[in-house]
Amino acid sequence: MDIVKRFLKYVSYETTSDEFSSTIPSTDKQLVLGEELVKEMKEIGVTDAFMDDFGYVYGSIPANCEGAPVIGLIAHMDTAPDMSGKDPKPRIVSSYDGGDIVLNEEKSIVLSPDDFPMLREYTGDDIIVTDGTTLLGADDKAGIAAIISAAEKIISSDRPHGKVMIAFTPDEEIGRGADKFDVGGFGADFAYTIDGGTIGELNYETFNAAHADVRINGKNIHPGTAKGKMKNALLIGMEFQSMLPQFENPMYTEGYEGFSHLNEMEGNVESALLRYIIRDHDLQILRKRSSLFFDAVAYLNKKYGEGTVEVDLKEGYLNMRSVLEERFEIVELAEKAIIKAGISPVISPVRGGTDGSRLSFMGLPCPNIFAGGENMHGKYEYLPVNSLKKCEEVLENIIYLGAEI
């Protein structure tokens, strides 16, 4: 099957994960895609493909030569809960002319290079876009399509290669993609996640992560008699936000600059909840940034009374750089594979996390390779067709070059 048709098939499956679910996977919809992937893998010759009780899909391609390392390829099945992934209506813009792309005329939704300058880099390329009412799902169904297309070609080729392990995980978008990953059973010497990212990107650094729930306990009194009695939880929440550094949020940061991001706010006068994610590539700076939350809570409780503001702050995944610096040859292998595909490698820090972050600390060193998607998690998401095809080529190169190590 053509890789573009394969991708368009996968995005038709709604696989949004749910951070508030306690099940594994968090949504049954991911199991439906998982079953389809097992079926397709068997059809192309991955005879041992299966899905386990937690919704993880595994399979392997046997080696046809001796002495090569066992290399893993991993992508995630879920899409982000930031926006609906139900019933997407993708279309291909052929030979993009460098101007505005009207995604939805009725709703006046336009993908413009004035807003997203990177779009101009794909002038002349075919680009897959949405209709502006859902996300596309290139994060990470582009990664899945590239892996299965590469696997199909490797199986049909007689070129020397080592054993290839394949895995598709649920719930990466909500930070649980590695929770039940069977590292021992997977059996790879090292692996690569194929997840999002501009063509040529290769990542061996991620953010360190934390998240914080800030709860404001107010006191609601009839506004006509509220003087000296009311504690407006919404206003106190706004005051809390104002105490964090103004320019250390995502709209002002890039590269290695970390942030505290107010991701959700809900409530009323009586109570309010502010949900934050906190990120930095340096763990000590992340912890300093986190300490500002406790400082603000202490100040506001002194001002409004003990127990007015509470914070529940937990650390999440860690920067995988400390692990991968010890195995830098696998980063260099991917770099060679990218160059062999005629692309300039772009080694950059991930301003986010991948399953590979946690897997690296679980004993499976795991850099990340581009899948080609742009503007992920929203209605302006798009996927250049050439980027998707080059991703597949890079994966084949990794497997064949790995046999030469």
Image: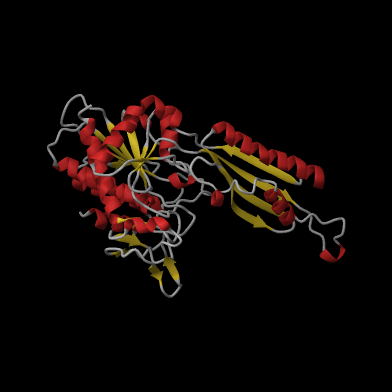
Q: Quadrant of the N terminus?
A: bottom left
Quadrant of the rendered image containing residue 312 = top right
Q: Is residue 143 above or below residue 112?
A: above
Q: Residue furthest bottom?
A: 106
On the question of residue 25 being in view, the answer is: no
Q: Is residue 169 above or below residue 1?
A: above
Quadrant of the rendered image containing residue 394 = top left
Instruction: Locate residue 323, reporting x and y percent.
Output: 42, 28
Q: Is residue 370 above or below residue 8?
A: above
Number of marks drawn: 0
Q: Is residue 191 above or below residue 101?
A: above
Say which residue appears at 21% left-offset and 55% top-offset.
2
Query: Which residue occupies the foreground of this view, 111 or 173?
Result: 111
Instruction: Locate residue 83, reporting x and y percent.
Output: 47, 58
Instruction: Locate residue 279, reporting x and y percent.
Output: 54, 41
- Along the horizontal axis of the image, is 107 left or right of 199? right
The color scheme shown is secondary structure
Say which residue appears at 22% left-offset and 41% top-offset.
46
Query: Which residue occupies the foreground of this view, 119 or 350?
Result: 119
